[in-house]
Amino acid sequence: MSAGSTPGTYVRVAGALYLLLALTVACAFIDMGPFNLVVAMTIAVAKAVLVVLFFMHVRSAGGLTRVVACAGAFWLLFMCVLTLTDFLTRN
Amino acid sequence: MSEERALVAHQFETAAQQRSAATLGMWVFLATEVLFFGGMLMAYTVYRVMDGAAFARASHAQNILLGGINTAVLLTSSLTMALGVHAAQEGRRRRSVLMLSATMVLGALFLGIKAVEYSQKFAEHLVPGVDFRYAGPDAGAAQIYFILYFLLTGFHAIHLTIGIGVLAVIAFSAARGRYTSAYSTPVEVAGLYWHFVDIVWIFLYPLIYLIQVYR
Amino acid sequence: MSPHSITTHEHYLNAGYGPRSWLLTTDHKRIAILYMLSITFFFFVGGFFAFLMRLELLTPDGDLVSAETYNKLFSMHGITMVWFFLIPSIPSVLGNFLVPMMVGARDVAFPRLNLLSWYIYVVGGLFTLAAMIFGGVDTGWTFYTPFSSTYAHSNVIPVVIGIFILGFSSILTALNFIVTIHTMRAPGLTWFRLPLFIWAMYATSVILVLATPVLAITLAMLGVERIFGVGIFDPALGGDPLLFQHLFWFYSHPAVYIMILPAMGVVSELITCFARKKVFGYRFMAFSLLAIASVGFLVWGHHMFVSGQSAYAGMVFSALSFIVAIPSAVKVFNWAATLYKGSIAYHTPVLYGFGFIGLFTIGGLTGLFLASLALDVHVHDTYFVIAHFHYIMVGGAVMGYLGGIHYWWPKMTGRMYPEGWAKFAALVLFVGFNLTFFPQFILGYLGMPRRYHVYPPEFQVLNVLSTAGATILGIGYLIPFVYLIWSLRHGKNAGRNPWRATGLEWLTPSPPPVHNFDEIPVVTGEPYTYAGEEEQRE
């Protein structure tokens, strides 16, 4: 049993990734204030999700793989959020 | 067609068990890597929150074009890696070796461009701790930006280099016909690692290069 | 039966002799023994530093060592005990030996990575030891910046490298356990039929995998700052020392759960076997382990209440720290409920289990004192904190380790230890421990700060009591060291299951054969099928 998609799918995913890259760069030249970061990170997450789902075969993987794939990111989120409760509330 | 036999280590009962163990093992390892890079990203987050303007100004020394090209290079290398894994799973010896080699070449290209960028930083005296001259009241924050730049991209480059080494070994095995539809686990697992290295850069590019570019 | 030979079957200890068969082994049982020897060595190294500290503290003046040397002593005591003894102890010794057997497997998922983890441990340990011998480090095991990054004149970089290396050993061990437990359980062995020791090893492994990398990168950044003179954490150069503390404690608080969860797993096994009664509230016990592991990641700021952290963050961390105590309390209640109406046999392993429950409870409750912001202002950085964590680390984790060593010694070696001496040693340890550390609660409450080699004369009596206790404690640890080695030659033949315990590990001969099971067992029932009081009448 081999996991994964067809080569055609992989090429289409790569195409989507290039498009998102172009979008990231284009948006960087538009002044959206604080939303520049939000947009950039959203696009980065979208690219990462595409790589994880298709190139890393998580789309066809079981629940355990999906949990482990997300665990690191979740924990990083805890670390950043709780640490920022300190830095953002200092006077 | 070479005989399709999976080599099952003594501690496993079946090839399927061995394969799911190897895959899970690599995913767990990748989780540790997320936290490893995460520590640096945590530092980056704190300092960018505390002085985003300084970070933005410092980041204007970066070459967006080179960084963008490098991003495209790595994205392409993920494509060739995925195609290489697919070829190995189908037991297609020549195509898998071709794709793995292409991945390695693209990885080396990334490192080459990175070396060019690093030497530019040296030329512009923007290497904290070695040769750092930065005019402005926010020199402290700028220095932190550049330390984090070198740390993040430096560790990334180390991981990429290790990946190229691993792929060299795998490509060698592939050339000897080791991987078939019954057994291609090492290639799959190496692929997971490679894609992770790509994902790290996907986040690093906007965070390092694309801060208030419109200024 | 001859006192010198045990059984005549081939097992993991006699299947191959000579250094190469040990140094190139991939057998998880031999690797466990290699770890046991290594961590015992470092335990005595760390104990030696503690002994010198307690000698100095016999008198109020600094008359034995200088302040700088004392700083090195407490730093090296902490570094050695935390990283080279406590964190590997139960997982790398008992975990390595038992995890495959308890899940009905022939080995861990990645036996060669397992051996590599031991070599990495040894390299990290020797590197750190060399750094300690050739000058030492005086920053405290906590390496707070900017002292460690800028102003310290001691061997910070080599020690930090040694700990960085050791981190990979932790990660590989944990990775192996997670994969083994997920993918190599015997047929019929569903998650809720697993022994609680396995649940504890799993929860511990998750913490190891997610926390250790953050320590690694933090120490790396510390090293870069020190070597290149840059300012990630140095305020003079634009950095923030509190960032170091956040990153450091993000690992180091979960680290204390790495040290205690395995001991809790051991204690569950001991209590159920020696009360002849299944664990009360098995699922609550399993979920409590997971809850401690996860919520334990959210409380690290309680180490920083007085560091300059914002008061709001302090409140958040304080509340979360209260919450993390709840699953621990659930476990203590459930152990008590397991003992209630059990048919208790007072063998040495469960004596350590009782010691654990009592001392861990005291340590845990005093943790709540420290989690209260207002109280912590007064007792932070005093001996109250030191007493608190030693009650948990020594009264808890070390007693759990010793209880486990005694419990599984027959399985690991095929020999029984001498019960009389073992009970005596357990008693000596209990007395010595409390005499050492209870006075420290009082000292801390009265205001004696930690990490000082001098103190006001009115604190001398309590300090003398504490040093007396430490001497007794030290002797107490030597006793098992002697009789366990003695038992290898002269101990009674243990047989397959001297405790009449349940669990797959007890199905094998003692010592087990290299491949553990002739046939992989099939599990059909719940764990801990003890009959309780009825069994007593057989």
Image (cartoon, rainbow, N blue to C red):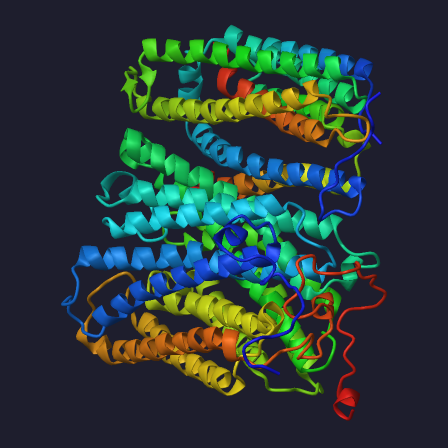
Pinpoint residue C127: horizontal percent, then vertical percent.
35, 46
Question: Can you give x and y, in whole percent of width and height, for residue C79 in the image?
Answer: 37, 54
Q: Position of residue C306 (x, y in %)?
A: 37, 54
Which residue is found at the position 24% from the left and 62% from the top?
Answer: C452
Residue C369 visible from this viewpoint: no
Observer-nearest of B120 and C348: C348
Q: Quadrant of residue C43?
A: bottom left
Q: Is C477 on the left-hand or right-hand side of B6?
A: left
Using the image, determine if residue C31 lies above or below residue A25. Answer: below
Q: Quadrant of residue B98?
A: top right
User: In the orientation shown, which residue stands out farthest toward the bottom?
Assistant: C537
Q: Is residue C37 visible?
A: yes
What residue appears at the point 22 percent right and 74 percent down from the top-left corner? Answer: C58
Position of A5 with respect to C399 (left or right) is right
- Eyeballing the image, is A77 above or below C399? above
Q: Foreground residue, C28 or A74?
A: C28
The residue located at (55%, 18%) in the rendering is: B206
Q: Is residue B21 left or right of residue C399?
A: right
Q: Is residue C336 above or below residue C515?
A: below
Label tally: 0
Q: Residue C399: horizontal and vertical position, in percent?
A: 50, 72
Tell me the quadrant of the picture where the N terminus of chain B can be found.
top right
